[in-house]
Image (cartoon, rainbow, N blue to C red):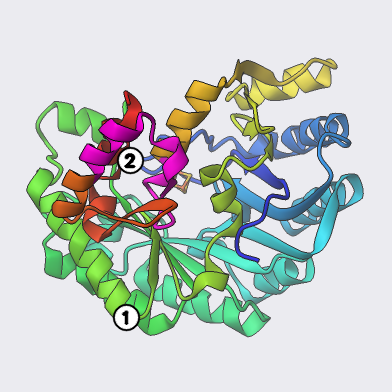
């Protein structure tokens, strides 16, 4: 089943060897703290042991989980498998950096029970990799892909970053072509962000970098979608493509469908169907709190029916599955808005659902906003 209502488990590994200049994720290069983080995570896992029942997804993300040593990876998986119940058809994903991979590491990950790899390739064009401050090169990414296949992985995903300043549609398609030739089961194509607190944000503020304007960004988005769908991929979420329905990310679909997820680690978010909570982002603070028997939770938010409806709209319009018509609000006003969106080619409508077209996915956040006040 590609989408289920069983809970998912997320583990945040907040370490990277180097910090990429565009990245706003919570991660640190202080890898000397890995031992303390693991001890704290063990305490947090123990405290959450009975929260949910059987998990059918595990997602180890970051940061860069592949910076963990073999011993640390064994310890982490030993803790998770010894604390939580997982279904036999578990989807177990780990994010890796191509620069960390060798045959032994790939075999270890397979042996530990991971069956899905998400590899942060970002680009197959060398100058783009250098611009993004990545520590691997294109040849290494190609080689790493083969290493994972050789280790037995049947579900390999690649992450790409697009929309670099000055990137033409042809340049965007260059990386996509190389990715498609490899034959992955999944592709995530993210537009480059300029998030506050990052060097790229500062460079943009000083006028040294300019992202593509709205028209160029839309043209690039649509070209990516068209190329990948022509190559046999399903464009099933704004940034995500799968070789077939079976290879859609079961774990990420839980977030989009409001299925409960337990998040462990600094900055990790959890949701139980009604309440969302998230941990302190700072690794030292996370370790200190759990070490002294305190909770790592920074904040908790109860979602009422209205907020759940708005989130369902915002999340649903980002997926090809779309939104249940029951969530659209006032029936008469929703109908006139729907008629207009159908005329503009942004959605299709059935008796029960409203689904964005490719052009609709390109403006998904705007679609959701249109229905928020109805
Ligand atoms: S992009 Fe990935 S590897 Fe780079 S700093 Fe962020 S989390 Fe680490």
125 to the left or right of 167: right
Depth check: 332 or 267 in front?
Answer: 332
Above or below for 14 versus 174: above
Residue indicated by mark 1: 231
Q: Dividing the image into four equal quarters, which quarter contains ligand 1?
A: top left
Residue 316 coordinates in the image, percent (x, y): 43, 45
User: Range of the magenta residues?
Assistant: 315-338
Q: Is residue 34 visible?
A: yes
Is disc 1's CB within 8 Å of ligand 1? no
**Residue pictured at 58% horizontal, 25% vertical:** 281
How far across and how far down the image is residue 228, in percent? Answer: 31, 73
- Label 2 crowd (10 A; few <14 / some 14-19 / many >=20): some
Q: Earlier in the sequence, mark 1 or mark 2?
A: 2
**The C terminus: image quadrant:** top left
Front residue of 319 and 231: 319
Residue at coordinates 76% horizontally, 18% vertically from top-left? Answer: 295
Residue 53 drawn at (x, y percent): 84, 44
**Residue at the disc numbered 2:** 22
Front-most of residues 217 and 12: 217
Number of numbered discs overlaid on the protein picture = 2
Residue 371 is drawn in which quadrant? Answer: top left
């Amino acid at each position: 089943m590609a989408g289920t209502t069983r809970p998912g488990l997320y583990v945040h590994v907040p370490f990277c060897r180097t910090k990429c200049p565009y990245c706003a994720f919570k991660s640190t290069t202080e890898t000397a703290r890995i031992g303390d983080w693991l001890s704290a995570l063990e305490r947090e896992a123990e405290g959450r042991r009975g929260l949910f029942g059987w998990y059918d997804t595990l997602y180890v993300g970051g940061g860069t989980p592949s910076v963990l040593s073999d011993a640390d990876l064994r310890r982490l998986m030993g803790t998770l498998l010894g604390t939580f119940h997982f279904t036999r058809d578990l989807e177990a994903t780990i994010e890796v950096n191509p620069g960390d991979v060798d045959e032994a590491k790939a075999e270890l990950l397979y042996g530990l029970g991971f069956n899905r790899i998400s590899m942060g390739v970002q680009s197959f064009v060398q100058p783009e990799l250098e611009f993004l401050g990545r520590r691997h090169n294109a040849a290494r990414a190609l080689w790493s892909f083969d290493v994972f296949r050789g280790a037995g992985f049947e579900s390999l995903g690649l992450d790409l970053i697009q929309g670099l300043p000055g990137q033409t549609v042809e340049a965007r398609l260059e990386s996509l072509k190389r990715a498609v030739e490899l034959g992955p089961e999944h592709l995530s194509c993210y537009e480059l962000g300029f998030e506050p607190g990052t060097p790229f944000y500062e460079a943009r503020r000083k006028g040294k970098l300019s992202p593509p304007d709205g028209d160029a960004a839309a043209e690039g988005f649509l070209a990516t979608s068209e190329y990948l769908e022509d190559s046999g991929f399903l464009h099933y979420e704004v940034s995500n493509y799968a070789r077939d329905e079976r290879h859609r990310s079961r774990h990420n679909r839980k977030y989009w469908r409001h299925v409960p997820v337990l998040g462990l680690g600094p900055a990790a978010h959890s949701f139980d169907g009604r309440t969302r909570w998230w941990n302190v982002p700072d690794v030292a603070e996370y370790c200190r709190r759990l070490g002294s028997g305190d909770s790592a939770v920074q904040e908790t938010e109860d979602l009422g029916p209205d907020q759940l409806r708005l989130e369902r709209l915002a999340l649903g319009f980002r997926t090809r599955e779309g939104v249940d018509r029951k969530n659209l609000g006032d029936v008469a006003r929703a109908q006139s808005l729907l008629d207009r969106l159908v005329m503009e080619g942004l959605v299709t409508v059935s008796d029960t659902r409203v689904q964005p077209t490719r052009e609709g996915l390109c403006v998904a956040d705007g679609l959701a906003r249109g229905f928020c006040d109805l």
